[in-house]
Amino acid sequence: MPGDRAGKVLVHEGFHCQLHKRQNSRFRWRCWQKECRVPLVTNDFNLEAENPRIRILDHKDHMHDVEMRQINRAKVREDLKREDPTV
Ligand SMILES: [Zn+2]
């Protein structure tokens, strides 16, 4: 939905994935890059936790390079303002 980019972002091995929806006790995420948008599925973990136990259940290869190379494990962060990931 346009204008609805705010929310939870999962950083998985440097790839930013935005929370899409919760379904069947799983979270479904989508790559933040418009031209990519590959899906990522994780377990249903506590989004508010400081260090949640995140299990990647399914993911596909991205069509682009990793955005932040130094991040090598899954982590969630809040992103409330950024619209365009290329800025
Ligand atoms: Zn991607």
Image (cartoon, rainbow, N blue to C red):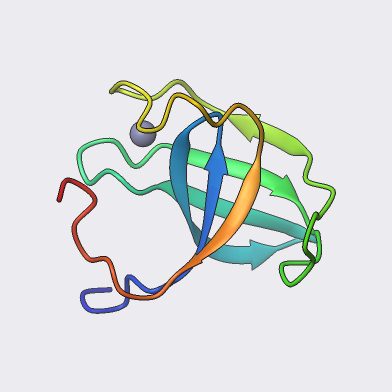
Whether residue 85 is situated above or below residue 22 in the rendered picture? above
Q: Nearer the viewer, residue 39 or 49?
A: 49
Please tell me which residue is depicted at 27% across the width and 66% down the height of the picture: 82
Please tell me which residue is depicted at 34% across the width and 49% down the height of the picture: 32
Query: Which residue is at the far right?
Result: 53
Tell me where residue 69 sits by quadrant: top left
77 relative to 16 in the view: left or right: right
Whether residue 42 is situated above or below residue 38 in the rendered picture? below
> Where in the figure is residue 65, as x and y percent of width and height?
31, 21
> Where in the figure is residue 25, as x and y percent of width and height?
80, 61
Whether residue 73 is situated above or below residue 43 in the rendered picture? above
Whether residue 14 is situated above or below residue 86 in the rendered picture? above
> Where in the figure is residue 2, as x and y percent of width and height?
21, 74
Ligand 1, what quadrant?
top left
Query: Which residue is at the far front?
Result: 70
Q: Nearer the viewer, residue 34 or 12?
A: 12
Number of marks: 0
Q: Nearer the viewer, residue 34 or 50?
A: 50
Please tell me which residue is depicted at 23% across the width and 79% down the height of the picture: 3
Tell me where residue 47 sits by quadrant: bottom right
Please tell me which residue is depicted at 39% across the width and 75% down the height of the picture: 80
32 relative to 71 in the view: left or right: left
> Where in the figure is residue 64, as x and y percent of width and height?
28, 23
Query: Which residue is at the far left?
Result: 87
- The N terminus sits in image quarter: bottom left
55 relative to 28 in the view: left or right: right
